[in-house]
Amino acid sequence: MNEVEHEGTPNFWLEGVSIRRRWDGLDELSGTYFTDNPLSISPGNNCPAPYAQFSARDVEVLVEPESMAELRVSAVGVYGSKGQRRLNASFTLNQEGFDDGTEVWLMPSKVGFGLGQQSSVQSGMYCTDISFEEVDPDLNYQRVTVRYRGILASKNQKIHLSTSAREMGIENIAVNLVGGWSDPRSGDILWPRAEVKTSFVTTTAPNMSDIPSAATPPFNPGVFSPSLTGELKWHWPNGWVIVAREAENLVSTSVWFVTETYVYNAAATF
């Protein structure tokens, strides 16, 4: 350790203070402070001028003769102007449903984002979740993770197909089909139930007043529908019928994820 010569006040920074200005976090200071009070800088306290904007984190005390000391200080803070900045962003175009994305920002406070707010990076994407990570307990800077959902680009409807058989009881009915019988009998037959589900994202609020009603699905997979005669039970609406519509809205936006269900309802059955 070299003896320091001084005149006037015994409290000053030695030459060679180093400041690292960081893009993704707080700036870092490293320097040595010469003082007659070895406790003049404590971890968590602001550094002496002209670096009062830095908060000490580690202080190594080197005691010198005549009750003097060198304090080797590591500190964090903001040197100059940092403001807010976006550290990274990623967005995903999904096959079905809402697209999603994430942005990470360094912010001087928790102010600046709200649910339903549109991304400044990607239009059509709206804030759904916000999380804050305190960068340092003595400074108000936050690392803010903002999650988005919405529509990155137009996409076709996602279509799901299914057909199942339902059992129906019959009384004195002839089944003139392959594997059936030509004389009237009582028993059970299996009848097809075709279903088409579609899902899509839209900026138009869905209308629920048409459930149920006759409506052709965007894809018709074909349905086994033999001609029937006799004492029949008639159904309305019949043919392809939209029977359900579910919609999820992104909070504070006009964006909706809609699922629609169509079934084929035979005009008449036994």
Image (cartoon, grey):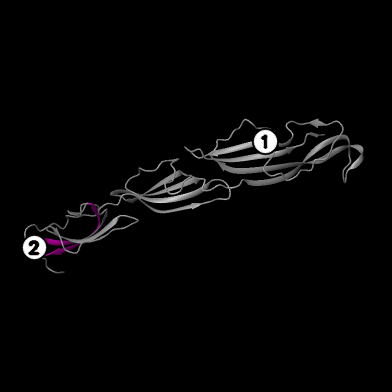
Q: Depth check: give the residue in front, 53 or 43.
A: 53
The quarter in which the C terminus is drawn is top right
Residue 63 rendering spot, x and y as whole percentages? 15, 63
Q: Residue at x 56, y 43 (%)?
A: 201
* Spatial separation of the CA atoms under disc 2 and disc 1: 89 Å
Q: Secondary structure at mark 2?
A: loop
Q: Where is residue 42 drawn, in percent x and y?
A: 21, 54
Residue 203: image x %, image y %? 53, 39
For the view shown, which residue lies furthest in the left direction?
Answer: 8
Tag 1: amino acid: Val
The residue that appears at 74% across and 44% down in the rendered structure is 164
* Residue 180: numbered disc: none
The quadrant holding residue 3 is bottom left
Q: Dividing the image into 4 quarters, which one contains the N terminus?
A: bottom left
Q: Quadrant of residue 157?
A: top right
Which sits earlier in the primary sequence, circle 2 or circle 1? 2
* Residue 212 magenta-highlighted: no
Q: Circle 1 is placed at which residue position?
A: 243
Residue under label 2, please give it: 6
Q: Secondary structure at mark 1?
A: strand
- The part of the chain drawn in magenta is 53-70
Q: Is residue 31 left or right of residue 215?
A: left
Q: Amino acid at mark 2?
A: His
